[in-house]
């Protein structure tokens, strides 16, 4: 942990600048080889208008979507780790993303097969994502809680089991899917921002605004939860409400994002740990830090995803896993027992 | 301000851990709860704190059921030190103590909060460790940091209310003899300021030396209660703890009972 002044320097200046630089660079890099230059140079009109279209309608929404998703995943990881007092908890590892994915797959497959217009509306997939992630969170929590005590082992084991089951059921849906649905499904089974559009970002925003309110409310209570539910309650925190708000916040943040982009691993686990190296355990600093660093890392990962094998688009989930694993192992090696990473 | 249990039951798995207990804890007094392992002492304390809810009966704070108070109001009226912490986060000692008052004195300015935390850390003998990571401290030091956090919760709140109740579950279990005395003096001082203290103790000598009243818990029931002189008798020691009567003596100056351990070398 650093001195208070350097922590604030990181949170208020360094990370926001880094995010801005990453986003600008990311919009400027891509398969078509178009840069901002094409806009400034003027050139002939056709060139400039193609560049304008690529930058504003393809790259910009993709970059915004990647940074919003990264922010959502980073914050969700920090919330889950605080809530469950477990350094491994993250929406991906304990099956919450899988729940959202399953619900979204149901809507995509059944929507295109059944012809019910309500299932094929633009809101249906993110709404299913929210319901799926909340359902998964709730199932997990109820299963793992006995007499008011949540068993961490149960959360992890049940989460892994639930994630596997949800993945299997999603597999069944893939089997039953028609061609259109199959193409949609493929996007998020590996995680990709290729389908990002401004309307999708508009749909995402109310959920993210709700999640932001949740994050701000949770910062204080999560600090107390680090001492255990008993001590948090004795200190005057409404523990049951903290858990409910925590679950709802994660479901709102992760559900619609997962529905649009698919399961993206390791951002949720690794980002809060990296942030804690700078800020220490105080959630009033960890949460905003995870929002910012999550956005930076996922935007960067997506930029790599679409430039590494250009013009092919590597699924971003693969990039985060390849980058995230060594970072995670390094974090584990830094501590003696993996506790309080 | 009083905390009262009326015909309180707490059952776990069809077994009554706390079995029809009625007792009143008053301010200005130190009450020591003693009894064998598994007698229900900690459960009784948890019921009094509102941490666990009763199966049957009542727990009243100033004649009102605990359930009628919000968690935040309760936090300003009582604080409790639990037996085993589960903290795995790298808070510094000072951060942890400050956290204690985050609800009970939510509007206390940051500077005042830090000053208070440091004063309390000084009182428990840990000011030098204020900036240290709590997880790097020894068991006894960690227990005192948590005690400081609990004191902070009550004392920061008491700026505009009464001192409140201090509930301590084996507060000296990890302490050396000098620190045992230090902590019990802190508890005593809280009672002398008009606050209430209820603590679970295993050391009957300390219980006799620092408590106004001893409550003996046996098999989930209150077996005896009263001043140390009247409660800690040879026959009680034998029937509750299964120890020989002869080990209880009377202090010639204070008139209080004390126990000598048997020599078990032979």
Image (cartoon, coloured by chain):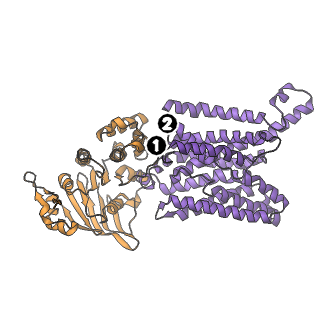
Mark 1 belongs to chain: B
Residue A194, placed above or below residue B52: above
Mark 1, secondary structure of its residue: loop
Tell whether label 2 touches label 1 (CB within 8 Å).
yes
Image coordinates of residue A141 in percent, x first then y, are 55, 61
Residue toward you, B66 or A111: A111
Q: Write the residue at 67% across / 62% down.
A: A166
Question: Residue B140: image x %, image y %?
Answer: 32, 47
- Report the side of A244 relative to B53 (left or right): right
Distance, label 1 to label 2, CA atoms, is: 9 Å
Which residue bears the numbered disc 2?
A: A1
Chain containing the residue with disc 2: A
Q: What is the display colour for chain B?
A: orange
Kindly identify which numbered label has been placed on residue B5.
none
Report the residue at 45% width, 55% height from top.
A229
Task: For residue A40, say whether it is visible.
Answer: yes
Q: Is A60 or A160 nearer to us in this picture? A: A160
Residue that label 1 marks: B90
Residue at the top extreme, as displayed: A41
The colour assigned to chain A within the rendered structure: purple
């Amino acid at each position: 942990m650093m001195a208070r002044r350097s922590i604030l320097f990181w949170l208020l200046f360094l990370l926001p600048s880094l995010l801005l630089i990453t986003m600008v660079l990311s919009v400027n890099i891509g398969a078509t080889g178009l840069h901002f230059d094409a806009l400034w140079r003027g050139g002939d009109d056709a060139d400039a208008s193609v560049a304008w279209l690529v930058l504003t309608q393809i790259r910009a929404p993709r970059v915004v979507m990647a940074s919003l998703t990264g922010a959502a995943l980073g914050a969700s990881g920090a919330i889950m780790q605080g809530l469950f007092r477990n350094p491994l908890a993250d929406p991906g590892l304990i099956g919450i993303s899988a729940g959202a994915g399953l619900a979204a797959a149901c809507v995509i497959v059944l929507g295109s097969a059944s012809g019910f217009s309500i299932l094929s509306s633009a809101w249906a997939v993110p709404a299913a994502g929210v319901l799926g992630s909340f359902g998964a969170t709730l199932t997990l929590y109820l299963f793992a809680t006995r007499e008011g005590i949540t068993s961490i082992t149960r959360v992890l084991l049940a989460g892994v089991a639930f994630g596997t089951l949800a993945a299997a059921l999603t597999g069944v849906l893939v089997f039953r899917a028609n061609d259109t649905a199959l193409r949609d499904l493929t996007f998020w089974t590996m995680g990709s921002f290729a389908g990002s559009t401004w309307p999708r970002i508009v749909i995402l925003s109310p959920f993210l605004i709700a999640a932001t309110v949740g994050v701000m409310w949770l910062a204080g209570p999560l600090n107390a939860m680090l001492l255990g539910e008993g001590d948090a309650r004795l200190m005057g925190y409404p523990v049951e409400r903290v858990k409910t708000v925590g679950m709802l916040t994660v479901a709102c943040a992760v559900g619609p994002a997962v529905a649009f982009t698919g399961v993206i691993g390791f951002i949720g686990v690794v980002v809060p740990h990296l942030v804690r190296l700078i800020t220490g355990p105080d959630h009033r600093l960890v949460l905003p830090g995870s929002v910012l660093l999550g956005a930076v890392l996922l935007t960067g990962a997506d930029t790599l995803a679409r430039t590494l094998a250009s013009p092919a688009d590597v699924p971003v989930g693969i990039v985060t896993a390849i980058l995230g694993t060594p970072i995670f192992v390094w974090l584990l090696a830094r501590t003696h027992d993996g506790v309080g990473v | 301000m009083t905390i009262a249990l009326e015909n309180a039951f707490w059952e776990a798995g069809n077994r009554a851990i706390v079995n029809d207990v009625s007792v009143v804890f008053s301010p200005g007094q130190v009450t020591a709860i003693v009894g064998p392992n598994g007698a229900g002492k900690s459960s009784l304390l948890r019921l009094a704190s509102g941490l666990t809810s009763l199966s049957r009966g009542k727990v009243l704070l100033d004649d009102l059921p605990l359930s009628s108070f919000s968690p935040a109001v309760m936090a300003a009226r009582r604080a409790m030190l639990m037996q085993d912490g589960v903290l795995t986060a790298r808070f510094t000692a000072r951060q942890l103590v400050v956290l204690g008052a985050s609800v009970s004195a939510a509007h206390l300015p940051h500077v005042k909060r830090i000053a208070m935390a440091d004063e309390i850390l000084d009182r428990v003998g840990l000011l030098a460790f204020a900036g240290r990571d709590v997880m790097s401290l020894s068991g006894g030091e960690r227990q005192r940091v948590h005690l400081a956090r609990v004191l902070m919760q009550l004392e920061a709140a008491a700026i505009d209310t009464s001192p409140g109740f201090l509930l301590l579950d084996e507060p000296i279990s990890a302490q050396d003899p000098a620190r045992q005395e230090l902590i019990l003096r802190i508890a005593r001082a809280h009672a002398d300021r008009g606050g209430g203290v209820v603590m679970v103790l295993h050391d009957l000598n300390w219980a006799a030396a620092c408590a106004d009243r001893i409550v003996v818990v046996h098999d989930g029931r209150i077996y005896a209660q009263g001043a140390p002189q009247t409660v800690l008798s040879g026959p009680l020691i034998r029937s509750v703890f299964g120890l020989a009567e002869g080990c209880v003596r009377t202090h010639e100056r204070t008139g209080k009972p004390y126990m000598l351990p048997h020599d078990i070398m032979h």
